[in-house]
Every structure is written in C-alpha cells, then in structure tokens.
Image (cartoon, helix red, strand yellow):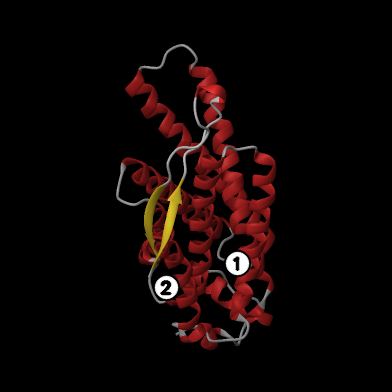
Amino acid sequence: MFGQLKIVPSADLGLLGPQQGEAASFNWKWQYSAAKWIIWLVLILAFVAPKANRNIRAPLILIPLIIVNLLWSLFMKYAKMNSTDAQQFTLIFNSMAVAVTVFWLIANYFVRFGGAIRFLLSFVTVMIVAGLGPWSYFAEFSGEMALFLALLVFMALTMLAAITLSRRLCGGKYRPVCFLLWLALWMLLGSLVATFGFLIVASVIFSSGPGFSELILMFALAGMIFGLCLYVLNLPYMILGFAHPFFRERFCACLGLESTPTATGRADADRP
C-alpha cells in the first residue's frame, strides 16, 4: 500500500513570475515511515518478553517517561530553536529517554554478572536501543548519523559512569539522597571532562589561538547544561526506583546497594 505525495514549490515573486511551480508527485510507501516506530516496539517488547515485567506494576516505569517528555516539551517551547535543530535535539532526547526506560526494565537480568560485565551489558543495551533513533531518522549511514551516534555514546558512558561512581561513594548502602547528590555531581563533572577533551582535540586540529579563553567558557557552559539535562532525564527514574517497592529491589540489586528491610522479600519476583 502506498499514497500519492505531491510537493508544490512556492515563493512570493511578486510580478516576476507565478507564486507556485508545477507539482511533483511521489509514491510514498508505508515502510518509509515505519522505521521510526521500531524503537517504540522495542519498548513494548521489554514489557512483554521478560517474565519479571508481566506485572501490573511494571507500567509504572512509564510515569518517568511521561514526566521527562512533558519537561522536554516545556523546554522546547521556550528554547526558540529553528525547526531543524528542534527536530534533531528531540530525536536525541527521545532515543535516550526510551533507552533509559528499556534499560531499567531489563536491568535485573544483569545482576548475576560482575561489575565490569554488568557495565558493558548496560552500555550495549542503552546504545542498541538509543541507536535505533538515528537509524530510523537517516535514510543511510552518513557522517551526520555517525555524529549522532557518537553523542549517544557520550551520553551513555557519562550516565553509567556517574551511576557507578555514585554507588561506590555511597559505600554500597541504601542512601537515596546521598546517591542522587553524588549522581548530580558526577554527571556534571563527566560532561565537563568530555567537552573539555573535545575542546583540546579541536584546538590542536585547528591551531586555536586567539579566543581560546572564550572557547573554554563556551564549552564549560555547554558541558554544565548537557550534564544538567542528562541528570534531569534520569532523576524521575531514580526517584521511582527508590520510592516504589516493585522497582526498589531491582534498582538496589543492579546498583549493588544494600536493600532496606522494607524492600526485602521481592527479589525472587523481580529476577528471572
């Protein structure tokens, strides 16, 4: 099945010529736009495939996803971006938000592995899901697509490294407020380190001289904003994980935190 898509160029030329050109027809097949739904199908699969998620409480993970989407819509309302930039930033946001949701739906399957393997599996999971966003957006692999994927790699590594370091600084204890504060700090620092590293590489390639201090300030500000956005993206998921018993046990198990007495008794139900 396909539809007939007509494109009519138009421009206000005044008396110089007609305002509309000849229509160009294009047969638009349904599969051309089907790819954008794949990432959402993966989210649905994360609910129905794992036995541990066949629970009436599992859809509560959608609450953080709805919250961050509302916050993003509010941010974009006042961001004053052009349509192209807004579409591309929204692509990155949606890809990462769905990836984080899927990650916490299947994170309890990684508990059986050691720290390094668990980190690797977490990174691969986030990147596979998030990578579906750029893959569905671009018709073919290109330098721009590679740039998007590189940005997602940076986001995934910053997020997972910040979670790992925050867990260690909490001493493996169940201390939600302490964990969230350390998480904010490490996400901000991780973003700054990455942006400064990029600045050093760029300065070597382009031999930046004058204006170097302005570039440092610009990249520092960009790193802070990026780290803050990444933290806000993860915060609702962390709050749900620490606040609700169904997710608390699997969050604590995956993060390597000692569970509270009130949170015990659910490990077997949440693990495969």
Quarter where residue 206 is shown: top left
**Residue lying at 36% horizontally and 42% vertically, measured from the top left:** 144
Q: Is residue 40 left or right of residue 127?
A: right
Q: Does residue 28 lie above or below 51 as drawn? A: above
Circle 2 residue = 110
Q: Amino acid at mark 1?
A: Lys
In this orientation, which residue lies closer to the viewer: 5 or 147? 5
Mark 1 neighbour class, 10 Å CA radius: few under 14, some 14 to 19, many 20 or more: some
- x%, y% of residue 164? 49, 58
Q: Report the quarter where the C terminus lies.
A: bottom left
**Residue lying at 53% horizontally and 52% vertically, measured from the top left:** 93
- x%, y% of residue 209? 42, 13
- x%, y% of residue 116? 37, 62
Asked which secondary structure carries label 1, the reply is: loop
In this orientation, which residue lies closer to the viewer: 89 or 272? 89
Asked which secondary structure carries label 2, the reply is: helix
Q: Amino acid at mark 2?
A: Phe
- x%, y% of residue 249? 58, 77
**Residue lying at 59% horizontally and 53% vertically, measured from the top left:** 183
Mark-to-mark CA distance, 2 and 1:
19 Å
Q: Report the quarter where the N terminus lies.
A: bottom left
Quarter where residue 143 is shown: top left
**Residue lying at 54% horizontally and 50% vertically, measured from the top left:** 90
Q: Which numbered circle lies on residue 21? A: none
Q: Does residue 212 lie above or below 166 as drawn? A: above
Q: Is residue 149 left or right of residue 76?
A: left
Circle 1 residue = 173
Which of the two discs, 2 and 1, sits closer to the camera?
Answer: 2
